[in-house]
Structures are given as structure tokens and as C-alpha cells.
């Protein structure tokens, strides 16, 4: 099994994992320690490990197969910000980038609140009346699943990535999944993402076997 297949399996398994969230300045978010405690055991279970490193311009997430030595290429990366004199700000930037790389690579469902969804970047205000209070012992309603043409979405994503100048090696299943998530409006819910991930994984398995 290739390192890409192992990561795909981890992505699917993490879809069913609940990630605790913290209350931050702009809403709830997943802490780096929470992501690490959920993702690291899954990686170990599937025979891979990861670590963070950096070059002059980017922070990179290196992922390696423990048995074969296969390395995920290209390594997930994010551009480093300008240096700050404040060590707390500097540390916060690195923590944010590590969270971003882990969530993007392993397709962890994003925070329940997206700052881009509101004009001021702040979470919607909750009403204080009794009707808005959380109800106990109620079952969570299942999310509706739209009838999406995944093959059409994959074709559009491939075309879009090719126009951006990505090579065949760079157009991975991860890049296609991310592109599809950005294309579909309204955003995919958890059930839809799970179905889309499964379709893309099967698509790339079939393409690689040809």
C-alpha cells in the first residue's frame, strides 16, 4: 500500500472522529494539541509518521512511510510570514500554520464557525432567550445529502488545477479534494464530504492502476 493510500484511509477514518474545539477570539477552533492527539495515533497505526521542518520561505509537513521510506511528495507546505519581534506572535504564527497543514492534509472538518462567512469576521451572536438554549437528550438530525455529480466535479477540479500550471505529480487526490470543496456552494456537509472523499480515492486508485 502506497503512502497516498494510507493517508486516504486515515482521512476517511478521521471523518468519524469528534474533535473538541476551543473558544477563541473569532469563534471556536481546533487546538494543535487536539489535532495531534487524534491524527498522530492514526498515522502510527497505518505505519507512517510526520514532522514539521522549514526552509527559507516555507513551513513543510514531512510525511514518511516507516517501512518503505516512501515520502509524500510534494510535501504539504505554507509560506512563512514575516519575522516578528514579539516571540508570542511568532509562536502563535507557527502554531496556526501547523494546524492549517494538518487539517488540510488529513481533510479534518473545518471549524464550526468560518470567519469568512460573516462581514465582520465574528461568529453570529446567540440569542439569550429560552428558545436558543441547548436542549438536552435530543437526537441530532441527519444532514441532507445533495445529489452531486462527483465525476463532473473531479473533471472540473482537474481542469482548474491544470490551468494553474500544476504538473501531473502535483495534481494529487488531496489537491483535487481541496479544489472541489472550494468550488461547491453551499459548502459540503460532513456526509457529502465523506462521499466525495470516497469517490476521489477510488478515482485515483483507478487512474494509478492504468
Image (tube, helix red, strand yellow):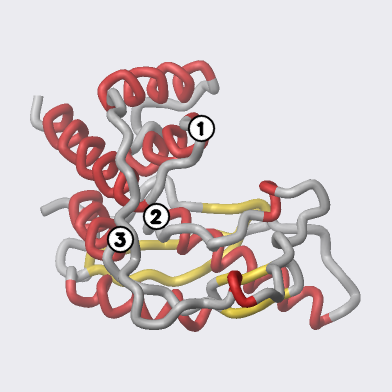
User: Where residue 54 sits: x, y (%)?
Assistant: 59, 63
Towards the viewer: 27 or 170? 27
Question: Which mark, by number, is residue 15?
Answer: 3
**Tag in front: 3 or 2:** 3
Is the N terminus in the top left, top right, bottom left or bottom right quadrant?
bottom left
To which residue does mark 1 refer?
185
User: Where residue 197 sits: x, y (%)?
Assistant: 28, 44
**Tag in front: 2 or 1:** 1
Q: What is the distance, in whole Å, between disc 2 and disc 1 at their CAs?
A: 18 Å
**Category of crowding for the residue at label 2, using alpha-carbon neighbours closer than 10 angstroms: few (below 14), some (14–19), many (at least 20):** many
Q: Are marks 3 and 1 in contact (CB under 8 Å)?
A: no
Which residue does the image show at 66% across and 52% down from the upper left? 79
Q: Quadrant of residue 59?
A: bottom right
Seen as rendered, the residue at the extreme front is 130
To which residue does mark 2 refer?
107
**Category of crowding for the residue at label 3, using alpha-carbon neighbours closer than 10 angstroms: few (below 14), some (14–19), many (at least 20):** some
Which numbered disc flags the more N-terminal residue, 3 or 2?
3
Which residue does the image show at 18% across and 75% down from the upper left? 45
User: Where residue 121 sits: x, y (%)?
Assistant: 77, 55
Which residue does the image show at 37% across and 43% down from the upper left? 174
Q: Secondary structure at mark 3?
A: loop
Q: Is residue 101 left or right of residue 149?
A: right
Which residue does the image show at 46% across and 25% down from the upper left? 161
Question: Which mark, by number, is residue 103?
Answer: none
Is the C terminus in the top left, top right, bottom left or bottom right quadrant?
top left
Q: Are marks 3 and 2 in contact (CB under 8 Å)?
A: yes
> Does residue 32 sit above or below 202 in this rendering?
below
Towards the viewer: 26 or 60? 26
> Does residue 77 sit above or below 123 in this rendering?
above
Amino acid at each position: 500500500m502506497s503512502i497516498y493510500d494510507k493517508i486516504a484511509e486515515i482521512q476517511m477514518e478521521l471523518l468519524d472522529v469528534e474533535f473538541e474545539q476551543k473558544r477563541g477570539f473569532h469563534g471556536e477552533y481546533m487546538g494543535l494539541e487536539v489535532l495531534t492527539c487524534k491524527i498522530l495515533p492514526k498515522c502510527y497505526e497505518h505505519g507512517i509518521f510526520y514532522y514539521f521542518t522549514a526552509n527559507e520561505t516555507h513551513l513543510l509537513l514531512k510525511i514518511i512511510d516507516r517501512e518503505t521510506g516512501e515520502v509524500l511528495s510534494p510535501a504539504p507546505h505554507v509560506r512563512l510570514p514575516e519575522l516578528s519581534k514579539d516571540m508570542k506572535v511568532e509562536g502563535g504564527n507557527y502554531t496556526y500554520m501547523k494546524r492549517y497543514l494538518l487539517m488540510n492534509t488529513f481533510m479534518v472538518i473545518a471549524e464550526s464557525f468560518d470567519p469568512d462567512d460573516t462581514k465582520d469576521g465574528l461568529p453570529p451572536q446567540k440569542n439569550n432567550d429560552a428558545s436558543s438554549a441547548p436542549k438536552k437528550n435530543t437526537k441530532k438530525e441527519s444532514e441532507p445529502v445533495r445529489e452531486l455529480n462527483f465525476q463532473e466535479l473531479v473533471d472540473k477540479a482537474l481542469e482548474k488545477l491544470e490551468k494553474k500550471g500544476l504538473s501531473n505529480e502535483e495534481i494529487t487526490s488531496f489537491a483535487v479534494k481541496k479544489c472541489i470543496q472550494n468550488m461547491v456552494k453551499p459548502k459540503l456537509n460532513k456526509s457529502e464530504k465523506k462521499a466525495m472523499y470516497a469517490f476521489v480515492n477510488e478515482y485515483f486508485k483507478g487512474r494509478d492502476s492504468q
